[in-house]
């Protein structure tokens, strides 16, 4: 399996910059998700990797071979990049059976007939669709069609599999099942997967690394739990996590090389970082995940229940504190009356401190009274 390297890749249409100076390395055998809101450049990036879109500038290297270079005039066509591409709408041939759909690419590549039969049988077993071999796409459910599309894409043994939001047309239950199948498929095949999605849950659960983009610029490229626990800036902090991170404005005053004093919700706290940091401005933003605001009768901070969203395994509580609404998550089945008084604390060693002017993460640590 190849390593994929993008060096200063830019894509423009006129004055519009879809992808801006993107540099990243996709390791051999990785499962990378390109995550971000609509129009952030993730699908354009995928299409440039696959050879379906030509970058304006930059360089792309796959397995040590340069497949695109604006400086050297190299642009290897998609058919010669040895990659598979799974489209959002599956693009199955409606007049062909499942067997014929999977075999089509192998026949185009002039595989031997017996080798084609063996490979199709292997794909049918891998995707657990042997019983559908002689059916047509119209006779299959959406999830079954998706498995056929994956089998057809994997059949020619591509070194890399590119997927553009392949689960977006499925219902919630089937999406959950197919996430499990895709993660298992990645392990079974050992292939390199590059997957486009706007769904942060898909990105968090599937990826070995997330590449989070906004307006054509990479905001963070890191393992999922790193992105969740230590977002690089306020955009990442707000985008990843459900419920979203609580963003609290504050004024900070340095009290030590690793600490600042600040006031939130009428209480004075000392923020103590896990390491020394520089405070360039007194204007800061605290980022507090909902799970770090536990509700208890003896909590130090009082608020009013704005609304509750019980979901069985956990309950999200929206709390009005002053003029702001914050979120708390409590695990277990519970409920609270709207407009009732409630008390909570700030707990945990993964409270984040951002510079309000730049939005950059400057420290993470804990709050102490």
Image: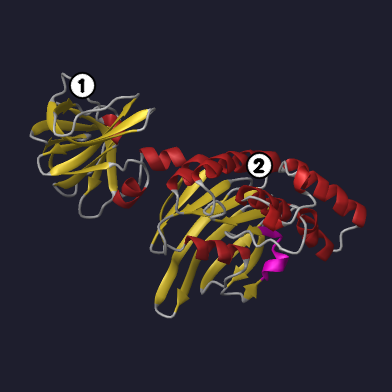
Name the spot of residue 276 as percent of width and height, x first.
Answer: 26, 36
Q: Is residue 98 magenta?
A: no
Residue 283, relative to residue 82: is it above or below? above
Sooner in the amino-acid sequence: mark 2 or mark 1: 2
Q: Which residue in the protein does label 2 denote? A: 185
- The coloring applied to the image is secondary structure
Q: Is residue 156 visible?
A: no
Name the spot of residue 211 as percent of width and height, x first.
Answer: 47, 52
Residue 122, relative to residue 90: is it above or below? above
Q: Is residue 82 magenta?
A: yes
Q: Is residue 318 left or right of residue 332?
A: left
Residue nearer the viewer, 97 or 9: 97
Label 1: element kind: loop
Name the spot of residue 280 as percent of width and height, x first.
Answer: 19, 49
3D distance between C-alphas at marks 2 and 1? 44 Å
* Residue displayed at 86% across by 63% down: 110
Total labels drawn: 2
Q: Quadrant of residue 334?
A: top left
* Residue displayed at 31% across by 31% down: 315
Q: Which mark is residue 296?
A: 1
Q: Is residue 340 left or right of residue 113?
A: left
* Residue displayed at 72% across by 66% down: 80
Asked whether the residues under the numbered discs 2 and 1 touch, taking CB atoms below 8 Å apart as contact, a structural biologist would say no
Residue 65, relative to residue 208: is it above or below? below
Q: Which mark is residue 6?
A: none
């Amino acid at each position: 399996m190849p390593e994929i390297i993008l060096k200063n890749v830019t894509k423009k249409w006129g004055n519009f910059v879809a992808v801006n100076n993107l540099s990243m390395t996709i390791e051999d055998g990785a499962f990378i998700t390109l995550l971000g809101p609509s129009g952030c450049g993730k699908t354009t990036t995928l299409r440039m990797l696959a050879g379906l879109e030509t970058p304006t500038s930059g360089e792309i290297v796959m397995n040590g071979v340069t497949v695109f270079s604006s400086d050297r005039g190299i642009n290897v066509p998609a058919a010669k990049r040895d990659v598979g591409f799974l489209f959002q709408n599956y693009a199955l041939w409606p007049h062909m059976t499942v067997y014929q759909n999977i075999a089509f690419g192998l026949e185009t590549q002039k595989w031997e007939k017996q080798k084609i039969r063996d490979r199709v049988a292997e794909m049918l077993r891998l995707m657990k669709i042997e019983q559908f071999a002689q059916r047509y796409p119209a006779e299959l459910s959406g999830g079954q069609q998706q498995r056929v599309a994956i089998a057809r894409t994997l059949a020619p043994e591509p070194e890399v599999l590119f997927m553009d939001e392949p689960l977006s047309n499925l219902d919630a239950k089937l999406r959950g099942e197919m996430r499990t199948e895709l993660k298992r498929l990645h392990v079974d095949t050992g292939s390199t997967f590059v997957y486009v999605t706007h769904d942060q849950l898909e990105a968090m659960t599937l990826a070995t690394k997330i590449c989070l983009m906004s307006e054509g610029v990479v905001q963070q490229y890191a393992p999922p739990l790193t992105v969740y626990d230590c977002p690089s800036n306020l955009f990442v902090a707000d985008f990843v996590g459900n419920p979203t991170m609580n963003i609290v404005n504050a004024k900070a005053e340095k009290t030590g090389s690793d600490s600042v004093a600040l006031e939130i919700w009428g209480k004075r706290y000392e923020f103590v970082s896990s390491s020394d940091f520089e405070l360039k401005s007194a204007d800061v933003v605290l980022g507090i995940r909902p799970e770090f605001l536990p509700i208890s009768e003896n909590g130090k901070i009082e608020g009013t229940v704005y609304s509750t969203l019980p979901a069985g395994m956990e309950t999200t509580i929206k709390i009005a504190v002053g003029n702001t609404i914050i979120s708390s998550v409590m695990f277990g089945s519970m409920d609270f009356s709207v407009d009732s008084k409630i008390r909570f604390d700030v707990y945990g060693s993964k409270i984040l401190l951002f510079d309000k002017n730049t939005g950059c993460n400057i420290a993470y640590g804990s709050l102490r009274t």
